Image: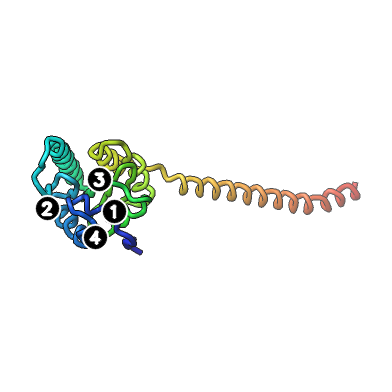
């Protein structure tokens, strides 16, 4: 059963340069979905809402544009490896990390073949039709550095690194132990039966002598 989005936080409006107090969250998500369609990335700096008015705003805009370009490169590199990746970046974090997966699920609903990664300061969420939950969460654990570009690279790198199937290995070991115990028990029962059969024969032979 696919994971369905439950709550889209207003933080997503800052991703597309909109004021959540004035713009419905659904409208902000519509812009996010349009941006990931065009370049695989929705993040501050992809399409600034207005020209910077101060040197500080200009510096921040340049930094965000550089991050957006770096994220697009990560998406392009992933595409070359056969990974349909889409990235959403929130400049602020909701109170818990669950809404990041909800955002990923909302994007994934529109692009069902994509692996979607949502990042915010300290949080990560993802969804994918290709990779299992264990691998995705392992990638999310590596996607919590201060750099969103490095986080996305770490996430993709983990997708390319299979996790040892400890659950299956443990199951095989347990089955092996059970099989060995059953085999040992059968041998013990057979030995007892053999001893029981041999005992009367030995007694009869002794009496005859």
> In what element is the residue under mark 4?
helix
Q: Which residue is label 3 attached to?
A: 91
Task: Compare marks 4 and 3 and give the one earlier in the sequence.
Answer: 4
Q: Is residue 136 above or below residue 142?
A: below
Whichever of labels 3 and 1 marks the residue nearer the N terminus, that label is: 3
Q: Nearer the viewer, residue 174 or 35?
A: 35
Identify residue for label 2. Answer: 38
Q: Residues within 10 Å of mark 4 (few under 14, many from 20)?
A: some
Residue under label 1: 130
Image position, residue 117 (x, y; %): 27, 49
In-front residue for pair 172/79: 79
Q: Name the residue beneath numbered marker 4.
A: 25
Q: Residue at x 72, y 49 (%)?
A: 191
Position of residue 73 measured from the top left corner of the image (x, y, whole percent): 15, 40
Q: Which of the two labelled residues, at mark 3 and mark 2, occupies the earlier sequence position?
A: 2
Q: Residues within 10 Å of mark 3 (few under 14, many from 20)?
A: some
Q: Tag 2, which secondary structure?
A: helix
- In this picture, residue 119 sits left or right of residue 44: right
> What separation in Å lies between label 3 and label 1 (alpha carbons)?
27 Å
Q: In what element is the residue under mark 3?
A: loop
């Amino acid at each position: 059963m696919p994971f369905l989005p439950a709550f889209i936080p207003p933080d997503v409006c800052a991703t597309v340069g909109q004021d959540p107090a004035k713009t419905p969250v659904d409208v902000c998500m519509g812009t996010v979905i349009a941006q990931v369609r065009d370049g695989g990335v929705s993040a501050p700096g992809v399409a600034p809402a207005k020209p910077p008015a101060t040197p500080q705003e200009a510096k921040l805009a340049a930094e965000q544009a550089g991050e957006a370009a770096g994220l697009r490169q990560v998406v392009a590199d992933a595409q070359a490896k056969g990974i349909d990746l889409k990235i959403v970046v929130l400049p602020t974090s909701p109170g818990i990390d669950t809404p990041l997966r909800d955002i990923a699920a909302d994007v994934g609903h529109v692009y069902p073949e994509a692996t979607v990664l949502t990042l915010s300061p300290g949080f990560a969420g993802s969804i994918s039709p290709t990779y299992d939950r264990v691998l995705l969460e392992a990638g999310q654990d590596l996607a919590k550095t201060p750099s969103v570009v490095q986080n996305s690279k770490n996430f993709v790198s983990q997708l390319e690194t299979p996790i040892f199937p400890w659950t299956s290995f443990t199951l095989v070991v347990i089955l092996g132990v059970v099989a060995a115990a059953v085999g040992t028990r059968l041998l013990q029962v057979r030995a007892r039966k053999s001893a029981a059969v041999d005992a009367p024969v030995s007694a009869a032979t002794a009496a005859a002598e």
